[in-house]
Amino acid sequence: MTRTVYVNGDYLPETEATVSIFDRGFLMADGVYEVTSVLGGKLIDFEGHVVRLKRSLDALDMAEPCSRDDLLEIHRKLVELNGIDEGLVYLQVTRGSDGDRDFAFPAADTPPTLVLFTQNKPGLADSPAAKKGAKIISIEDIRWGRRDIKTVQLLYPSMGKMMAKKAGCDDAWMVEDGHVTEGTSNNAYFVKDGVIVTRPLSTEILHGITRKAVLRLASEAQLKIDERLFTIEEAQAADEAFTTSASAFVMPVVEIDGVSLGDGTPGPIARRLREIYLEESVRTAI
C-alpha cells in the first residue's frame, strides 16, 4: 500500500512527495529529526520528543516549522491515514532552500522544510530481538562534538551498524578516550551487583527521551543508578547490559566484543525495565 506522507503542509502519496535538490538537509545535512513510536494507534512520549526537537532547533538557530499542537495533529492524522497500530512516525526539519547551494545560511525568512512519514511495524512491542538479546561490537567514536543535537548527520552511525552486521552482530557501541559514549542509535547501560551504570548527559551523547523515562521508572522501582563514564571492559564484566531508544524501547544486550554477559540471555533487570516501560508508555500514550 502506498503511504501518505506530509511535506510542507500537504498530505501526499509517497510517490508524489518531493523536496528541492537545493534543500539544506540534502546538501549540508542541515536538519534535525525525531522518531516517535506508536503503540495501539497512540503516540509514545510525544511531549518529550517535541521538547527535544525545539532544543535541537534552538541549538542550530533554526526556525520552528509549526506549533506543538500542529505537530500533534499531523502525527495523529498520518497514523490514521496509514492505519498504524504499531510503528513509527519520522519527523524531519531542515533549514529549507533558497534556490542555490551556499555554505552561508539562507535568509532568515527562508521557510524551513517539514517532512513526516510513518513506518508500519507490527509486533514492535513484542519483539523477538528483545527476547533473544543483542550482540554488539565496539568501534571508535569519530563523530562531531555536539551529539546532543539530534541532527540528520547519521553517516557514521550507519557505518557502525554495517560494521556490526559484517561481524555477525546486531549493533555497535562507540568508544571515545577509552570510554563508551553510546550506541549507534541508542543509549548504553550495564548492570553490576544490581546497580545500573550509564554515561551522564553532556554534549557527547544524545539526551534520549526513552533514557529519561527508563531511568525515572528504575528509580521509582528502587533500583540504584550510577551515571558515570565506563569502559567496554567494565561492561564485559557486568551481570547484564541493555540499550534504550524510541524504536526499540529497552533492548537487552547479551554479548560485547565476543564476551557473553551472565548466562548469555537477557538479564532480569533489562527484562523488567522493558516490561514496566511498555506498561507505562501504553498507559500515558496520546
Image (cartoon, rainbow, N blue to C red):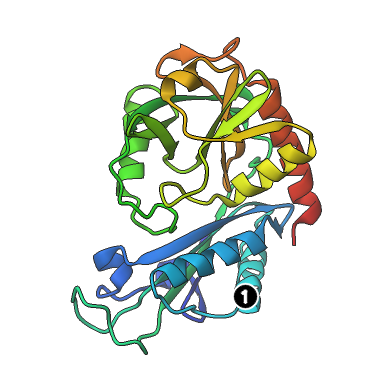
Q: Is residue 178 above or below residue 44?
A: above
Q: Is residue 105 left or right of residue 136?
A: left
Residue at screen point 49% across, 22% down = 235
Residue lying furthest bottom = 109
Q: Is residue 253 left or right of residue 275?
A: left
Q: Nearer the viewer, residue 204 or 263?
A: 204
Classed neighbour count for the residue bearing mark 1: other residues with Cα under 10 Å, few (<14), some (14–19), many (≥20): some
Q: Quadrant of the N terminus?
A: bottom right
Q: Is residue 16 above or below residue 38?
A: below
**Vertical order, 286 against 166 (above or below):** below
Question: In this rendering, does residue 172 appear at all?
Answer: yes
Residue at (63, 48) in percent of width and height: 212
**256 vs 115: above or below:** above
Residue 63 placed where, x, y %? 44, 79
What is the number of callouts on the image? 1
The residue identified by callout 1 is: 68
Callout 1: SS:
helix
Q: Could you say which quadrant of the image residue 157 lies in?
A: top left
Horizontal side, residue 40 vs residue 177: left or right? right
Identity, as a three-letter code, of the amino acid under mark 1: Arg
Say which quadrant the C terminus sits in: bottom right
Q: In the rendering, at what x and y percent does residue 35 appear?
A: 54, 56
Residue 92, given in percent of the width and then of the height, sits at: 45, 66
What x and y, as percent, mark residue 66? 54, 80
Query: Who is closer to the viewer here, 109 or 206?
Result: 206
Asked which quadrant contains residue 194, the reply is top right
Name the residue rendered at 42%, 52% in the picture.
203
Residue found at the far top of this picture:
263
Residue 19 appears in which quarter of the rendering? bottom left
Q: Is residue 83 visible?
A: no
